[in-house]
Image: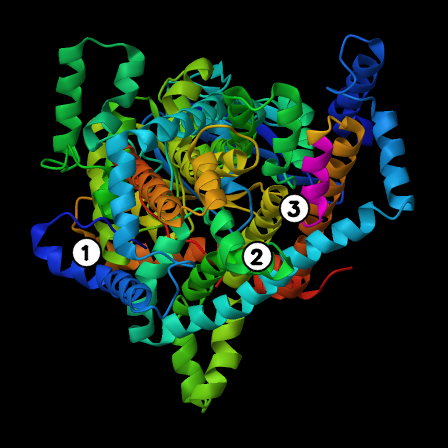
């Protein structure tokens, strides 16, 4: 059974002049248990909005989201979120950030410390436990954000352009780390990204969204042999083919958006 | 109807005031009815009392303010451009910012008398520090890229000042003005309350000494209106002059 | 701008920063002693210094300073209590905001020292009257900064906390208040020097005791050296208070990432 089931999702907003604008409209897709799925699309297509609805921060205007068969009602322990801006609590140390969700769960002290230690080590944050977010680089902050969410052990991991604020090299390192964590921890991942390369590299399936109002335009299965090294994968012919395929789909939508703009205000 | 929803608290206060004042529970000198105050206000204008006094206060406040702006901007830019000037004046300015200049009212009364000049001077002294600091921050914060590109395009050093530094520093200068203008009014008022010599502050304190509440409130409302008008005008000017800046650059240069 | 330099190696820096002031003081002493500026107008720095010592030793300054500080800090404390509560309330509840917003907007352009004659009529020439004016003067910066601080809390922080299991009730204390703390403390930092300024204004106009009154008194009888001594020591106290506040603030906000802003 699909872990995440989205049916007919629509979200409307009131535009400045009062007319209703659909950010997303009639959007439907599934994500299987422990599947890694990415969503790509042109700017403004509503992919972040979609993610926030699945996370439970925003209520949809119409439509249905079910996790493991149960409809969602607001944010919950079953869905963890990682934001592009990391959203770390700046007044807490790395350790206390990671511990946050466990405190809310009211686990016994030793249990909390044990779990925190585990994820600090997993994300390579040893030695930084007592640092504050302002002392960390972007890549480290990203790792803390992930550690914090994983420590809470949600079934589903929702990620909104998690690597968007990182430089190219750090971004690649973080991507690989995410993959290894995913393999080890077995989680369902829904990741939103601008980068087609990233989507193809990381996921088993890529959902391409249309321009606004957003719908699922196409689904591309990514069948790559991931036992190889990063260089091998990225330079392989299959990767290039898949990447181009997805890119062309996205490009079509991006150009639509541009064409609309080029026509100018009416 | 929407306006009502937004301002009902004010109307409530007005209503409470009027009814409390008229009920007899509250002594007259404590809180005269708004209607009486309004009458007094109108009478004072027609009697030719309120307007000249208001103008007098404004003359003193704006006079000092203008001096402070000129001196402050010049000094601020000089401090930003010449290290020696900065070295000399920075501690003095820091000191000036910490000193409540109102403590100098008796000193100024001693040195410069209690006439307009004395008041204008104290206003100027009080406002010059914030103006200098904000101008300095504005002139200093000009992005080196802006200056380098201007130089590369052949802008002479002197023109650099006008073409690049001044426009970049303008939002900071405006911030300084928004801080300094209320200061100018406050200093003018307090000086008038202590030293006399006409003006709204003087009117108010004299009314208080004679327990003449309607006159007191009338002067107070005049001050409120002045403050309000100045705030609005400054905002409009800011939007007009800086509108291009905030539209273009968003968060500021 | 002014930096409290603590490391001994920077004593030279401190000297360099203090040099212009020392030059000024030296110039003052010279000008007045030599007769360039009549001591009728400006007493010598040394005589002011002597007067200051006398004021402190005799306890006169202490007494009046205590009154002024009581009023300033009392008004400040009350304004913090009311102001933070009001700011929090306005930021979290539409109804509270709609109620107080027009009132705040109305009071905002009024220089609060203009209320001194009014409080004089209401409460006489008392501590309570002074505290009331100070309270009102300090209230607005605290309310406004608190309000904006809370509103500016990034929603991603709140959302993250909710995803991590924080119930809606707990969000306020666990997330909103710490995140808004820099802004709240900023409001308080603005209010502190304001309290000192306002207390002097009140005491110059309507008080029988206190530093402002003392300054006025000395000025009136021509004891200018005592007048300047009083002004000088008060300014020093206000300066120390401000520096102390800055220090406390940076201790509380050690975690805060400073972002440059005009």
Q: Which residue is the site of mark 1?
A: A232
Mark 2 on the same chain as mark 1: no
Q: Are marks 3 and 1 in contact (CB under 8 Å)?
A: no
Q: Position of residue B40 (x, y in %)?
A: 86, 33
Determine if the magenta segment contains residue A168. Answer: no
Residue situated in front as seen by the camera: A64 or C36: C36
Chain of the residue on which disc 3 is drawn? B
Q: Earlier in the sequence, mark 3 or mark 2?
A: 2
Chain of the residue on which disc 1 is drawn? A
Mark 3 on the same chain as mark 1: no
What residue lies at 50% left-to-right and 54% top-to-bottom?
A: B110
**Relative to residue B23, is residue A7 depicted above or below?**
below
Q: Which residue is the site of mark 3?
A: B196
Q: Is residue A238 visible?
A: no
Q: Position of residue C59 (x, y in %)?
A: 29, 29
Q: Which residues are magenta?
A: B197-208
Q: Position of residue A204 (x, y in %)?
A: 34, 40
Q: Which quadrant would the C terminus of chain A be assigned to in this image?
A: bottom right
Q: Position of residue A200 (x, y in %)?
A: 35, 49
The circle on residue B113 is 2
């Amino acid at each position: 059974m699909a872990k995440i089931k989205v049916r007919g999702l629509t979200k409307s907003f009131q535009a400045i002049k009062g007319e209703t604008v659909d950010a997303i409209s009639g959007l439907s897709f599934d994500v299987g248990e422990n599947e890694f799925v990415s969503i790509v699309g042109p700017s403004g297509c509503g992919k972040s909005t979609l993610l926030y609805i699945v996370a439970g921060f925003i209520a949809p205007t119409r439509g249905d989201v079910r996790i493991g068969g149960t409809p969602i009602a607001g944010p919950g322990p079953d869905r963890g979120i990682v934001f592009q801006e990391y959203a770390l609590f700046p007044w807490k140390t790395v350790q206390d950030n990671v511990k946050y969700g466990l405190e809310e769960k009211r686990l016994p002290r030793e249990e909390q410390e044990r779990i925190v230690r585990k994820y600090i080590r997993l994300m390579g944050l040893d030695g930084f436990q007592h640092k504050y977010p302002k002392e960390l680089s972007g890549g480290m902050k990203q790792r803390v954000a992930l550690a914090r969410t994983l420590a809470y052990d949600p079934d589903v991991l929702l990620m909104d352009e998690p690597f968007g604020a990182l430089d190219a090299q750090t971004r690649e390192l973080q991507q690989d780390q995410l993959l290894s964590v995913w393999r080890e921890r077995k989680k369902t991942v829904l990741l939103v990204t601008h980068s087609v390369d990233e989507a193809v590299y990381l996921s088993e399936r890529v959902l391409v969204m249309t321009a606004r109002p957003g719908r699922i335009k196409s689904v591309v299965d990514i069948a790559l042999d991931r036992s190889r090294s990063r260089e091998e994968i990225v330079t392989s012919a299959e990767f290039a083919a898949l990447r181009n395929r997805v890119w062309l789909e996205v490009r079509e939508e991006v150009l639509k958006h541009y064409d609309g703009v080029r026509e100018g205000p009416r | 109807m929407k306006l009502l929803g937004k301002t009902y608290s004010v109307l409530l206060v007005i209503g409470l005031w009027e009814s409390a004042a008229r009920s007899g529970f509250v002594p007259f000198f404590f809180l005269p009815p708004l209607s009486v105050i309004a009458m007094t206000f109108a009478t004072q204008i027609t009697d030719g009392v309120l307007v000249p006094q208001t103008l007098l206060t404004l003359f003193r406040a704006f006079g000092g303010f203008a001096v402070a702006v000129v001196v402050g901007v010049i000094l601020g830019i000089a401090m930003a451009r010449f290290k020696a000037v900065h070295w000399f004046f920075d501690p003095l300015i820091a000191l000036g910012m910490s000193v409540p200049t109102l403590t100098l009212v008796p000193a100024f009364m001693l040195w410069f008398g209690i006439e307009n000049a004395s008041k204008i001077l104290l206003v100027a002294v009080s406002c010059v520090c914030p103006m200098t600091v904000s101008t300095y921050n504005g002139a200093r914060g000009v992005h080196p890229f802006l200056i380098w590109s201007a130089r590369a395009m052949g802008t002479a050093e002197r023109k650099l000042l006008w073409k690049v530094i001044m426009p970049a520093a303008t939002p900071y200068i405006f911030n300084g003005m928004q801080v300094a203008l209320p200061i100018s009014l406050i200093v003018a008022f307090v000086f008038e309350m202590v030293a006399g010599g006409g003006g709204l502050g003087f009117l108010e304190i004299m009314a208080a000494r004679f327990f003449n509440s309607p006159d007191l409130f009338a002067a107070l409302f005049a001050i409120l209106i002045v403050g309000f008008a100045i705030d609005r005008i400054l905002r409009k000017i800011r939007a007009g002059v800086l509108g291009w800046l905030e539209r273009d650059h968003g968060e500021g240069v | 701008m002014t930096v409290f330099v603590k490391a001994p190696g920077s004593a030279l820096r401190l000297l360099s920063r203090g040099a212009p002031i020392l030059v000024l003081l030296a110039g003052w002493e010279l000008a007045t002693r030599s007769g360039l500026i009549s001591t009728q107008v400006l007493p010598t720095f040394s005589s002011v210094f002597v007067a200051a010592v006398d004021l402190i030793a005799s306890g006169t300054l202490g007494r009046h300073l205590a009154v002024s500080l009581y009023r300033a800090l009392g008004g400040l404390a009350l304004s913090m209590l009311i102001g933070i509560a009001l700011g929090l309330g306005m930021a979290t509840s539409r109804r509270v905001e709609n109620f107080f917003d027009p009132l705040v907007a109305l009071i905002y352009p009024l220089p609060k020292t203009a209320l001194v004659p009014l409080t004089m009529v209401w409460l006489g020439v008392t501590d309570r009257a002074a505290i009331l004016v100070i309270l009102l003067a300090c209230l607005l910066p605290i309310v406004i900064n608190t309000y904006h601080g809370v509103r500016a809390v990034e929603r991603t922080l709140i959302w993250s906390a909710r995803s991590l299991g924080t119930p809606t009730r707990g969000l306020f204390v666990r997330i909103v208040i710490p995140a808004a703390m820099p802004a709240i403390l900023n409001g308080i930092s603005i209010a502190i020097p304001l309290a000192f300024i306002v207390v002097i204004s009140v005491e110059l106009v309507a008080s029988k005791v206190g530093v402002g009154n003392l300054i006025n008194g000395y000025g009136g009888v021509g004891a200018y050296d005592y007048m300047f001594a009083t002004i000088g020591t008060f300014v020093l106290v206000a300066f120390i208070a401000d520096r102390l506040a800055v220090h406390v603030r940076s201790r509380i906000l050690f975690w805060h990432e400073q972002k440059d802003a005009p």
